[in-house]
């Protein structure tokens, strides 16, 4: 133990040694917050705290797994196994399983993933005969999600005229009814969605003081990583559980709060001191992850935010290379640059693929990167796309398995009742649904009693329904006697799924069968893992729970060496030697949707801070001048975030790019407070009448971003206006193309050139701003 503690600096040791009481560690990126948590847990155990009494909440399952592994190294595997460690969702799903019946749910409740929830909401919208262009299912889902995360139940909703009015104002007066139907339908199906896992935990702890007391007593030490991104619902759970012993340790960085759009509340970290008595606050200042150049550049970015806690972050690491900035004409070219650079760095410095990450603002940006990496034969892995378990063929199998565990699960039932086709058509399913809603029962229960209910079905259809019920029940019998692997194999054969897939002999069809084989392998591994831990427990239901809560990041075994592609949001907490932040363009990053208020813009800036601070050795910022977006080629200009970094930390791969290359009036955003978008639009290139002209050339085509004279060190055009240009030189201009110098006049900063361009004729340009290359 001592050895691990001595690997921490003094500031890091202090919170480790504080055994009891509330404490918060606020520190910048890469300062060892997560590492301190790991050592602290191990230290508590070395002092005799029982692993069963420690609860550690992490942001991803992957983080939990890694932490557990490190703790195992320190205290031994057997002890570490007993820790309660995982994401909020996974830990509280386990507790809800134990306590479900108190809340009226079966303990085998299903967890609906987002796909299930959105499909159910679409069905409800359709049944209510509402316009799905106004009631967009995904939007409705996130609205419901935000209610739940703010603990606004259906009842609370209908007691809140303001909320109802807000929905009515946004043309969704029947939002409340949809919410109510959705909640009822989930309940009837014995299903909880992701947000229910937190909402119902709150309900459990509120309504049942004995249950609260039990878990307060169990979780005597609570630790939370990435506390800045907890939402209200999570906050309340932590508060309630820690209330008795007050041994709560949270770590976070307000500068990395990036999930406000999902309800994360930065005030949770800002107000922590007020929530408990005698809170000890610790600050870590030394960054161990990144070079000086990256740390200082990142500091200079976050400095621009008004809402922040003052923090110092420094590093003893080398200065390291500057952040490389690269401009390309299209996103395709951007991809080729990134792939080429990875290729070169690998060759030159013997790097592995896994040491590179490509981070982007939106998932759509991955395509250009993928194309380029494929062409170079560089293996890569995309995180956060459709997870393996959401692929159609996999989800079909899983839905059969879900039905075995919980036949009330309507989303699973509707998905597979007629797949593979067995003659139970849409009309029949509609009739069954209507009857189920009428009797307040699940569809499966209606099917079980189909002979007693008159739904005007012909005898053939009734027979098919009975056959389906019998088939599912036969699976349930097998599940009682055999393990999940045998059952799944049986399900694949008996339902006709495999035969159905075999009909498709295309490579895609074959890949689907291979995917099912991969799933089978996964189930086998899972069962073996379970046996190792505590004998074969109800393997199938636990496997399904893991699957429901798995994010794509979790399937990463880390075995194969691949370049990582993911959104910046997903990269939180991770680190890579080389990081490419691509698509550094206005309207993309910062996102066009996040420029309406100062707080949105500041969140984008924090996101940029997160992106940059993932890099250990070398960061790249790349942007394209045009990109396919929303199905058409759109012009793009470099992100303001590049401009916000001091030049001394940057190296422009094409030196001509320094300082941007188009007109932007320098608007100080600060003067607007919460600015509206129309004002922000001013920051776009001005078309129409330019404000002022130099010679014959409108300012808009010249680089006047930095009106200060170019210093003697500035690369690129410095020597151009000094002396080297002569009449007769052929030059290349960024916008006007090729031309010949026909006249030169003025001296120093006022030196101008008259250039005859091949297209567009003669123009007079002020050399200190014109971007010319002699060719
Ligand atoms: P983030 O804010 O990005 O989550 P963090 O504060 O959690 O970062 P860690 O991930 O714990 O930081 O640490 C960053 C890196 O620095 C890790 O590789 C970690 O192993 C290393 N590190 C932390 N503390 C020390 C130390 N005292 N000596 C050497 N390396 C350290
Ligand atoms: Mg961390």
Image (spheres, helix red, strand yellow):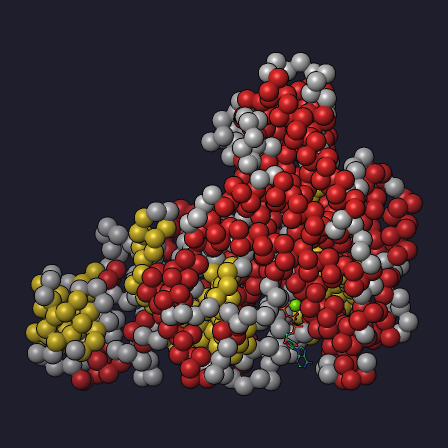
> Where ligand 1 lies, by image quadrant?
bottom right
* On-image quarter of the C terminus: bottom left
Q: Is residue 292 above or below residue 300?
A: below
Identify which residue, 714 or 665, lies in the foreground.
714
Residue positioned 59% across, 69% down in the render: 558
x%, y% of residue 560?
55, 70
x%, y% of residue 257?
61, 59
Residue 172 visible, this angle: yes
Rendering quarter of residue 153: top right
The number of callouts visible is: 0
Rendering quarter of residue 323: bottom left
Residue positioned 11% across, 79% down in the render: 729
Identify which residue, 2 or 22, lies in the foreground.
2
x%, y% of residue 270?
69, 58
* On-image quarter of the N terminus: bottom right
x%, y% of residue 384?
54, 56
Q: Is residue 617 above or below residue 28?
A: below
35 horizontally vs 498: left or right = right
Residue positioned 68% across, 60% down in the render: 525
496 horizontally vs 45: left or right = left
639 horizontally vs 136: left or right = left
Residue 387 visible, this angle: no
Identify which residue, 369 or 476, lies in the foreground.
476
Identify which residue, 649 or 199, lies in the foreground.
199
Q: Is residue 265 above or below residue 707?
A: above
Residue positioned 88% across, 46% down in the render: 211
């Amino acid at each position: 133990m001592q050895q691990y503690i001595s690997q921490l600096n003094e500031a890091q040791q202090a919170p480790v040694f504080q055994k009891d009481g509330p404490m918060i560690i606020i520190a910048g990126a890469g300062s060892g917050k997560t590492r301190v948590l790991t050592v602290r847990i191990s230290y508590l155990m070395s002092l005799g705290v029982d692993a069963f009494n420690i609860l550690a909440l992490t942001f991803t399952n992957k983080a939990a797994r890694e932490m557990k592994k490190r703790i195992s190294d320190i205290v031994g595997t057997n002890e570490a196994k007993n820790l309660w460690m995982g994401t909020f969702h996974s830990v509280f799903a386990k507790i809800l399983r134990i306590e479900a019946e108190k809340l009226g749910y079966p303990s085998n409740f299903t967890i609906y993933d987002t796909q299930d929830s959105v499909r159910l909401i679409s069905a409800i919208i359709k049944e209510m005969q509402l316009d799905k262009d106004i009631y967009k299912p995904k939007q409705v889902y996130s609205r419901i999600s935000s209610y739940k995360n703010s603990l606004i139940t259906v009842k609370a909703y209908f007691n809140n005229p303001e909320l109802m009015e807000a929905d009515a104002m946004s043309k969704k007066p029947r939002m409340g009814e949809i919410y109510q139907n959705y909640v009822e339908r989930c309940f009837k199906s014995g299903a909880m969605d992701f947000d229910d896992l937190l909402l119902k935990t709150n309900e459990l702890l509120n309504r049942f003081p004995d249950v609260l007391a039990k878990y307060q007593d169990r979780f005597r030490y609570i630790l939370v990583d990435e506390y800045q991104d907890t939402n209200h619902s999570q906050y309340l759970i932590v508060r309630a559980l820690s209330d008795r012993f007050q041994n709560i340790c949270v770590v976070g960085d307000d500068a990395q709060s990036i999930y406000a759009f999902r309800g994360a509340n930065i005030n949770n970290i800002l107000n922590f001191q007020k929530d408990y008595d005698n809170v000890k606050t610790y600050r870590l200042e030394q960054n161990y992850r990144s070079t000086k150049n990256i740390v200082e550049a990142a500091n200079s970015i976050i400095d621009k935010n008004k809402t922040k806690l003052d923090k110092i972050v420094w590093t003893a690491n080398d200065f390291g290379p500057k952040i490389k900035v690269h401009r390309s004409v299209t996103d395709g070219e951007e991809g080729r640059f990134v792939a080429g650079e990875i290729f070169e760095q690998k060759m030159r410095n013997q790097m592995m693929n896994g040491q590179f990450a490509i981070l982007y603002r939106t998932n759509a940006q991955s395509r250009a990167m993928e194309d380029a990496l494929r062409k170079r034969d560089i293996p890569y892995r995309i995180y956060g796309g459709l997870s393996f378990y959401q692929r159609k063929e996999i989800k079909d199998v899983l839905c059969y398995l879900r039905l075995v565990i919980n036949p009330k699960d309507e989303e699973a039932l509707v998905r597979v009742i007629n797949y593979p086709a067995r003659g139970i058509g849409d009309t029949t399913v509609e009739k069954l649904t209507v009857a189920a809603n009428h009797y307040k029962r699940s569809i499966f229960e209606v099917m079980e009693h189909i002979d007693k209910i008159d739904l005007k079905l012909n005898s053939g259809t009734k027979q098919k329904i009975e056959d389906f019920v019998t088939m599912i029940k036969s699976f349930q019998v097998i599940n009682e006697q055999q393990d999940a692997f045998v059952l799944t194999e049986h399900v694949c054969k008996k339902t006709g799924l495999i035969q159905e897939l075999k009909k498709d002999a295309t490579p895609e069809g074959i890949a689907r069968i291979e995917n099912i084989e991969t799933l089978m392998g996964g189930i086998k591994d899972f069962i073996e893992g379970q046996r190792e831990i505590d004998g074969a427990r109800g393997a199938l239901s636990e496997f399904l729970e893991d699957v429901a809560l798995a994010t794509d990041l979790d399937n990463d075994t880390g075995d194969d060496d691949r370049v990582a592609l993911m959104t910046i949001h997903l990269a939180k907490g991770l680190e890579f030697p080389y990081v490419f932040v691509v698509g550094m363009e206005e309207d993309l990053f910062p996102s066009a949707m996040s420029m309406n208020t100062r707080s949105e813009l500041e969140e984008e800036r924090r996101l940029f801070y997160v992106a940059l601070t993932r890099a250990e050795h070398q960061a790249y910022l790349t942007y394209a001048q045009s990109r396919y977006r929303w199905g058409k080629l759109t012009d793009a200009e470099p992100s303001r975030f590049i401009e916000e970094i001091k030049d001394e930390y940057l190296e422009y791969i094409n030196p001509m790019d320094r300082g941007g290359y188009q007109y932007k009036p320098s608007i100080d955003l600060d003067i607007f407070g919460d600015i509206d978008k129309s004002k922000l639009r001013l920051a776009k290139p001005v078309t129409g009448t330019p404000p002022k002209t130099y010679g014959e050339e409108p300012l808009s085509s010249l680089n006047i971003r930095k009106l200060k004279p170019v210093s003697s060190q500035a690369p690129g055009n410095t020597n151009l206006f000094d002396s080297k240009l002569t009449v007769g030189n052929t030059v290349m201009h960024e916008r006007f193309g090729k031309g010949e110098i026909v006249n030169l006049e003025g001296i120093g900063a006022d030196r101008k050139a008259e250039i005859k361009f091949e297209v567009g004729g003669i123009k007079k340009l002020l050399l200190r701003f014109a971007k010319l290359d002699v060719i």
